[in-house]
Amino acid sequence: MQYYEDVEVGETHEFGEYHVTKAEIVEFAERYDPQPFHVDEEAATESAFGELVASGWHTASMCMRLLVDGPISERAGMGARGVDELRWRRPVKPGDVLRVRTEVLRKRPSESDPKRGYVDTAVEGINQDGEVVISYVALGMIGRRDVDR
């Protein structure tokens, strides 16, 4: 288990492999973001994208899955305070394969709760061509080892 004390500012990781399918793009969009370029291939050809693309919220969710299956599962995670600087950089299409790259930007102990620390991490979702498709700063909370629980 990795605790707050184990996290180093500047550490980077790249991991995961998520295969994006047309069926999943449409299913997610029909439920949460039913804009025509997410749910209808024909209508999508007339959009700014020219083809069916994933919702940005779906892209964020796929990256979250990679994070949970990766480093979050190995940390004394306590949730997150939110995200900053969320940007959808490029559309995600059926057949894309996503991975995630992270870099710890800063950390500080909580002033209100000695059992946790704050870790801010730059997160990028990257496609099979090495293009960044989403970026944001995750404002995580992580348990501290050196306190009575």
Image: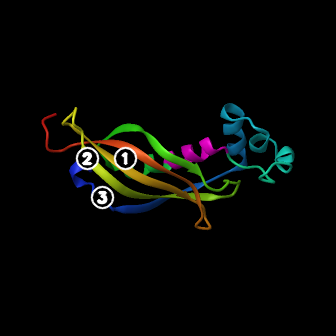
From the image, tell me which residue sits under label 1: 73
Task: Give the x, y percent position of residue 113.
Answer: 21, 33
Among the 4 quarters of the image, the one containing residue 50: bottom right
Q: Earlier in the sequence, mark 3 or mark 1?
A: 3
Q: Nearer the viewer, mark 3 or mark 1?
A: 3
From the image, tell me which residue sits under label 2: 108
On the rendered structure, is 13 left or right of 130? left
Binning the other alpha carbons within 10 Å of mark 3 as few (below 14), some (14 to 19) or many (20 upward) gives some
Magenta part of the protein: which range?
Answer: 55-65
Query: Helix, strand or loop at disc 2?
Result: strand
Query: Helix, strand or loop at disc 3?
Result: loop
Amino acid marked by disc 2: Arg
Binning the other alpha carbons within 10 Å of mark 2 as few (below 14), some (14 to 19) or many (20 upward) gives few
Q: CA distance from mark 3 to mark 2?
A: 10 Å
Instruction: State the residue lying farthest toward the bottom.
Output: 129
Is residue 82 a member of the stretch shown in magenta?
Answer: no
Front position in the image: 17 or 80: 80
Amino acid marked by disc 3: Val
Query: Helix, strand or loop at disc 1?
Result: helix
Task: Give the x, y percent position of residue 116.
Answer: 24, 39
Q: Residue at x 33, y 62 (%)?
A: 10
Binning the other alpha carbons within 10 Å of mark 1 as few (below 14), some (14 to 19) or many (20 upward) gives few
From the image, tell me which residue sits under label 3: 9
Amino acid marked by disc 1: Ser
Task: Give the x, y percent position of residue 12.
Answer: 38, 62
On the rendered structure, is 74 left or right of 94? left
